[in-house]
Amino acid sequence: MKKLTSLVTASALALAVTAAPSTAHNKAAGIAAGVIAAGLIGAAIANHQHNRGYKVYKPHPDVNKEENAVGRCVHHGLAQVESAGGDNFILDHVLSTTDKDDGSTHVDFVATRYYSYGHRTNNVSCVVLKGEVVQFKYS
């Protein structure tokens, strides 16, 4: 499992660094790169678990609450697409993750669903509360 964590972390960081704008001193760009990296780690964990047949996302002990929330949301999307006969659900990028006072984590992201007849890209709003996806909406 440590090899998976290292591989996922290295891949996410490499993608975030190569995708970062040339004005690395820009504070907003640094924050955005951090959100993107977190989303990539959570999505990679979700894909790994889904491909191994996990019906429920299991939080990874080496990532933070927000990364696990992204993972739960992506795992949920993968299950939805699969149950509708689709081929894949890909996280394109995370827009935001917000922890609320009620203990929930709100994840807003862009994702693409793939089906045999084509694909569809949407914004997704996902709410994770007490380890479960309690809201999952496309807009």
Image (tube, rainbow, N blue to C red):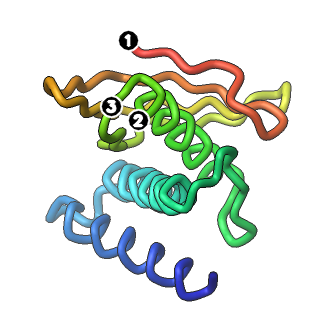
List the residue tagged with mark 1: 139
Q: Secondary structure at mark 2?
A: strand
- Left or right: residue 29 versus residue 37 is left
| Cβ–Cβ under 8 Å for marks 1 and 3 | no
- Residue at image position (36%, 23%) is 123
- Residue at image position (62%, 29%) is 106
- Residue at image position (31%, 65%) is 16
Q: Nearer the viewer, mark 1 or mark 3?
A: 3
The three-letter code of the residue at mark 3 reads: Gly
Earlier-in-chain disc, 3 versus 2: 3
Residue 104, position as x, y percentages in the image: 76, 30
List the residue tagged with mark 3: 86
Q: Is residue 25 above or below residue 72?
A: below
Q: Quadrant of residue 84?
A: top left
List the residue tagged with mark 2: 95
Residue 81, position as x, y percentages in the image: 41, 30
Residue 37, position as x, y percentages in the image: 42, 60
Q: Compute the Cα span from label 1 to label 3.
A: 19 Å
- Left or right: residue 88 versus residue 62 is left
- The circle drawn on residue 88 is none
Q: Is residue 105 above or below residue 50?
A: above
